[in-house]
Image: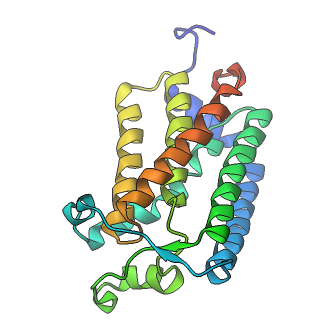
Amino acid sequence: MSAAQRPHWTRQIVSRCTYLWPLKAVGTATFMMLFFWGYFGILRNPLYPASVMPLTAVDAWIPFTPLAFPAYVSLWVYASLPPALMRDFRQLVLFGVWIAAMCLFCLGLFWIFPTQVPLADIDWALYPEMAVIKNVDPGGNACPSLHVAAAVFTAFWLDRIVAAIGAPQWLRWLNGAQCLAILWSTVATRQHVVLDVLAGLVVGIAFALPALRQTTGSLLAETV
């Protein structure tokens, strides 16, 4: 279908979001519940004592700010967008298989080579929203940052979809900006250090590129 024949990109988004939406909703929720079950199970039961990740000069350049909290937690909505925007069951399954493989790879590393971030000299009681995260996830399962890996993996898939539906260029830039904001937030909330981010970036790219090579035109084409 030529660009002139395709429905307007906003109509495509609506039709894609309504395609198999109950399956997508249940599948995404189930995936996240299973992920958190595995994540916190490994966080509390690592195979060895956790090693503390070293700080770099770049860590000192990125100050702590509670303003990073919304960007940090936005990952869970952001990572749900690619499956929500798919119109092909095979590609929906493919996305799930690849992101599950990436998560299992990182969880395996967390279990065998546990790491944690250095303790920050911050009174978390002064920042209630951050205190909730710190009480649940005190900075373990640090390297590679799975938060970063998931954001990068999502950004690659969203970029492919956004380009395919003929959306304006600003939407692709917004996608990139959101991904960068999440990467920044992992350090600005002191949940990760820069080395965790770099490792997560490598993991996200390493899984996103081969996953996208397996996709076909059915991921991209608008069929109605």
Q: Nearer the viewer, residue 162 or 153?
A: 153
Q: Tell me if residue 56 comes above or below residue 170 in the rendering.
A: below
Image point 33% across, 87% down: which residue?
124
Pick the quarter of the image with the N terminus.
Answer: top right
Horizontal and vertical percent position of residue 90: 79, 34
Can the viewer see residue 223 in this picture? no
Pick the quarter of the image with the C terminus.
Answer: top right
Q: Nearer the viewer, residue 91 or 134?
A: 134
Residue 38 is drawn in which quadrant?
A: bottom right
Horizontal and vertical percent position of residue 212: 63, 30
Horizontal and vertical percent position of residue 139: 47, 76
Q: Tell me if residue 65 comes above or below residue 217 in the rendering.
A: below
How many labels sit on residues? 0
Residue 105 is drawn in which quadrant?
A: bottom right
Q: Residue 183 vs residue 111: left or right?
A: left
Image point 70% across, 44% down: which residue?
98
Can the viewer see residue 6 in this picture? yes
Horizontal and vertical percent position of residue 44: 64, 83
Colouring: rainbow
Q: Residue 193 vs residue 75: left or right?
A: left
Image point 63% across, 59% down: which residue?
106
Q: Tell me if residue 35 comes above or below residue 48 in the rendering.
A: above
Q: Residue 197 vs residue 214: left or right?
A: left
Q: Tell me if residue 144 comes above or below residue 161 in the rendering.
A: below
Image point 44% across, 60% down: which residue?
196
